[in-house]
Amino acid sequence: MSATTLYVPRDAAAVSVGADRVAEAIRREAMARGAEIRIVRNGSRGLLWLEPLVEVATTQGRIAYAPVTPADVAALFDAGWLHGGAHALRLGDITRHPYFAGQERLTFARVGVIDPVDPDDYAAHGGWKGLQRALAMSQAEIVQAVTDSGLRGRGGAAFPAGIKWKTVLEAPTPRSSESPIPNPESPPSKYIVCNADEGDSGTFSDRMLMEGDPFCLIEGMAIAGVAVGATQGYIYLRSEYPHAWRVLNEAIARAYAAGWLGADIGGSGRRFDLEVRLGAGAYICGEETSLLESLEGKRGMIRFKPPLPAIAGLFGRPTVINNVISLASVPFILAEGAAAYRDYGVGRSRGTLPLQLAGNIRHGGLVEKAFGLTLRELLYDYGGGSASGRPIRAVQVGGPLGAYLPESRFDTPLDYEAFAAIGAMLGHGGIVAFDDSVDMREQARFAMQFCAIESCGKCTPCRIGSTRGVEVIDRIAAAPDPAAQQALLRDLCDTLLHGSLCALGGLTPYPVLSALDHFPEDFDSRKTHEAAA
């Protein structure tokens, strides 16, 4: 009898609630019963409130049981779960679950399905197909395919990826004598840099992809290298992701061994090398020029632009900088064609976006959907409303620098232009929900405090303005007539918005002003004084 395969996630979210202990309990119980099993540590399916979610490969297909604890394991064996037996934790085919069934998983198609560090399993599920097609195309054809797909940067700025790649492809490269790299024998003329410094609150799609399907990112970066003529890539990973660090390094080593990285990728005679570099915990290094400074071994501080990184980036060379999801979207585009990707979405927002539900939400997790569904649909159809059972009062979209949206904005479609029209941004797709117990003045204060702590200090509006912002918001709470202090706060936000060198200071006014505009009652200190009296 062949061994039964069980899938137990190695994703950090699953591990945090006991997935490693569950895997060990399954091994011990199977050994005690003489049952032949094989455990695959896969990625998470994204239904995080159900972790640890264990799937069993049966003759009926993969059957899910969740959430499983070590104490449940013996009873699950008694129920015959190795053959899909009935049990209170049995969910059946997880792809038919209401949370999962309505999704359009393009980038996350393999996450939770395959062994993340097995290149053959990756290939068996459509992996490397995009790279193989790219190797048969000209550089201009690859760039045109990315352009035609409508892919925009998924890190927050939503800049068209094809334009960035075209700029790097056409950028002149400095002569080796001009290289700032000490004594290089043959320095790369161009670079591919993946921004994996996922520091926004409520975001985890980059981490899930890197832990659950790292070869997808590796393939996307290799395609980018072939497209623009870069032979060296770096993944700049935040230090708070130790699980992703281990998975990425193991996957890269196996990709080299399988011939998908190195001097002869896919037998094409073309070279692409890849390394992972750890950041040191600075939020500002999520900004591309600060990231480059850190990657070069310097303090992470903003660079003046121009020149753009596409012209003079890492070590002064033309550099493609994209985030994890942007690069991981590329294999699908090359494998299935630009039109197949462009057919998803609305307006200028094409393709899909992995949305991350967090905060006070009943069903936290990842939802990959085409652009166009509304925030209300996401919060209630997928998220199930608040975890507390109270009304959702506010939602912050796009990380700690995103606007706070009231219930009256929940019917806004998830679309870059639609969000810009209401003074908000989609950013990286992080959604943090708050129920009606939240104090929005405190949330505005947090935004200013966050900016003050995380500022690199290079520009005065961000360095000093954020500190003054905290002080002004504190004065609003104490002032018998807050109108003058609110006017001062708006003036300070205008200075930050138009005078900061980068998006940290430039976007901090978004959460502050949106809280002030949509929830003015929380800034009326007179009500606080009356309540206290």
Image: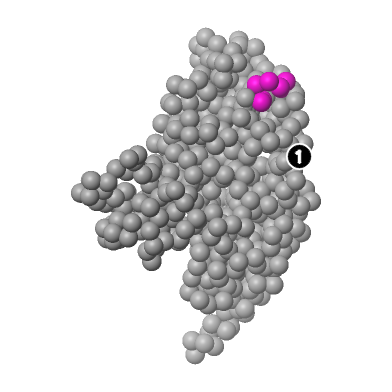
Confirm whether residue 448 shows in the render: no
Q: Nearer the viewer, residue 508 or 325?
A: 325
Colour scheme of the rendered structure: one colour
Q: Quadrant of residue 186?
A: top right
**What's drawn in magenta, residue-wise?**
133-139
- At 50% from the left and 39% from the top, the residue drawn is 213
Question: In the image, what residue occupies the spot 58% across and 26% down?
Answer: 222
Q: Nearer the viewer, residue 287 or 92?
A: 92
Circle 1 is placed at which residue position?
339
Residue at 67 percent across and 55 percent down: it is 425
The reply, left or right, for residue 86 in relation to residue 475 is: left
Callout 1: SS: helix
Query: In the displayed image of the protein, which residue is found farthest to the bottom?
Result: 533
Residue 433: x and y, percent? 55, 66
- Which amino acid lies under the numbered mark 1 shown in the image of this protein? Ala
Which quadrant is the N terminus positioned in? top left
Viewer can see residue 117 = yes
Q: Residue furthest front?
A: 1
Q: Position of residue 519 (x, y in %)?
A: 63, 73
Q: Classify 61 as above or below 219.
A: below
Residue 144 lies within the magenta run? no
Q: Position of residue 71 (x, y in %)?
A: 27, 60
